[in-house]
Amino acid sequence: MFRALGKKKAKPDTINEDRGILVFENTTEVIRAESILKAEGWKIKVMGPPPEIRSGCDLVIEFPLIEELSITRKLSEINIKPTQVVPINSPLLEPVDLLLEKEYGKYLMVRAANMKITVDRATKMIVNVSGGGCPDVPYLAGEMVNRHLSNAPQPRDIGYTLCAYALQLAYDRVVEQCSV
């Protein structure tokens, strides 16, 4: 069984902070918005959308609701407009954490959305990359499998799809877990 890496409850410094979700037309907008907002210092997190508001994109950005006006204004400056801004005022609107991990003896597998990466903890070699349905998944796997974590290319540097983005999240978590 997988175990979720993130906690559903707010972090201690955001316990009393109301949160909202930004919903976008496509994944490209989510990735661009994430880069801009993080560079500007906002505490945001890319998550999976709750089923009640799922539209076309498989990602949303969770953000402090008090920052809604500033965030939407900043995004508007770079011509990114969320299709919806939804306050999280119900357990049904909780976004879904994208990361899950599973131990298989000496192997660690981390799943982010539909992408999975498996590493031999002892050697820190990537033994498998799988999942997703994007056309670049075989290429990503071919470039990463049988490579040491410290020598493998970053998925964000060699792929441009939602699968590459998700694999980057999983890769970052594996690196963190294996302390490379």
Image (tube, rainbow, N blue to C red):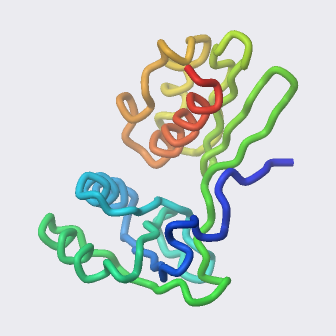
Q: Is residue 164 left or right of residue 73?
A: right
In the depicted structure, whether residue 99 falls above or below residue 157: below
Q: Count of labels shown?
A: 0
Extreme left residue here?
A: 77
Asked whether 4 or 147 is in front, the reply is 4
The residue positioned 48% from the left and 62% from the top of the image is 59
Asked whether 119 or 165 is in front, the reply is 119
The residue positioned 53% from the left and 38% from the top of the image is 167
**Where residue 165 sits in the image (x, y, percent)?**
45, 44
In the depicted structure, whether residue 89 falls above or below residue 76: below
The residue positioned 62% from the left and 65% from the top of the image is 96
Q: Is residue 48 left or right of residue 127?
A: left
Question: For residue 180, which quarter of the picture?
Answer: top right
**Where residue 111 sits in the image (x, y, percent)?**
66, 43
Asked whether 105 or 83 is in front, the reply is 105
**Where residue 169 sits in the image (x, y, percent)?**
52, 42
